[in-house]
Image (tube, helix red, strand yellow):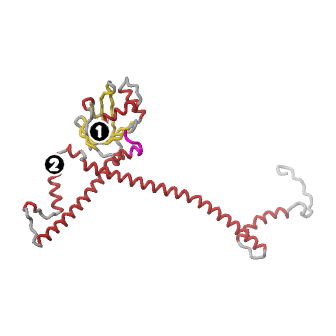
Amino acid sequence: MEGSGAPAEDILFRRPWLPVSISGCQLLAKSWFGETAYHILLTDMHCVWEERMDTAVIQSRAQELNRRLRAPVKAFFTHLCEVVKPCLAGVGSQTENEVQISLTRQEDGSINMRLKSELAGLPFYWEFHCTPAPVALVCIQLVRPLLTMSRLLQRQVEQLGGLLVRKDAEIQDYRENGATLSRERLQTDVFEEHTHREDFIAKALPLLCSEQQEALGFDGDLQELYAAIVTHGSARKRKLSEQHSAEEVEHANKEPELVLNASAGGSVSSESADGNEKQTNNGEPETRGAKMVNRPKMQQSLPVTSTAAERPASKPKKKKVGLFR
């Protein structure tokens, strides 16, 4: 089993594509197997297929394919990993005589891989039902890394071309100072980048297109380059995520300070208003704030002057009869 310290998607992303051959079909594969779950990807460069399985679905499919199986998932999943992982790594199973694996294409565009092995003296069957992967997954797992690899290799070619130009200048300086080759077969032509590129494409491209099986797979150097690129991308993404989280925490810590400052500002305003009121009582000119403070007092004093005791005597009015009394 593979460690579960990192998320399954990150582990699968860092895995290189490996060339495999199943039923005569040349494919690239990458896979992740957990304790009782797996995620595999397959491509023939015309389509990308995937299958994700968790514990419950694995248990259900195992019961459908093996009617006599009564064991929990962990009991047979280890055996499944042992016989499948070598096949998906392109190295063949260590018990190849006991394992049979075949691939069939379905009308709906999916592919099925059927596996037959032996578990505890009884036949054990398993099927991978791989469906076309979404475009976003294909871009993340295949397209973007390949484009990055292309740009990186192009920069390497440019640097090597510049190095050859400097080497030619160094050799020319030796010749001008009387140096000669001891062996004539070591002499080379002056490097011209444009001419070399055209000649290389004219000779190498037809060979690459004719050798389809070799062109599909990654050799060891390309696998290492792919792994380095996706690992760097994962580390950069994780660093940006941590920075974003730190900024959010810092912003959340500043919000209580803003609330406290707003409350302090309100109390100062109240004190200022009281101060203005005292100045008014001492005979100084009223300010706008003082008028606002005194306005409620004036409104409260109005009902006091209109009490029944202080009203002048008036003639009794006749009572009205009707809706208004």
Looking at the image, residue 166 sits to the left or right of residue 110; the answer is: left
Looking at the image, residue 85 sits to the left or right of residue 8; the answer is: left
Q: Which residue is mark 2?
A: 207
In magenta, the rendered stretch is: 1-9
What's under tag 1, amino acid-wise? Answer: Leu
Marks 2 and 1 sit apart, C-alpha to C-alpha, by 27 Å
Q: Earlier in the sequence, mark 2 or mark 1?
A: 1
User: Dominant secondary structure of the magenta stretch?
Assistant: loop
Instruction: Tell me if mark 1 has few (under 14), some (14-19) or many (20+) residues whose alpha carbon lies within 10 angstroms of its own.
Output: many
Picture quadrant where residue 96 is located:
top left
The answer to which of 48 and 12 lies nearer the viewer is 12
Residue farthest to the top, as pictured: 68
The answer to which of 106 and 218 lies nearer the viewer is 218
Residue 210 rendering spot, x and y as whole percentages: 16, 46
Tell me if residue 184 comes above or below residue 149 in the rendering.
Answer: below
The answer to which of 49 and 37 lies nearer the viewer is 37
Q: Secondary structure at mark 1?
A: helix
**Front disc: 2 or 1:** 1
In percent of the image, x 8 and y 60: which residue is there? Answer: 185
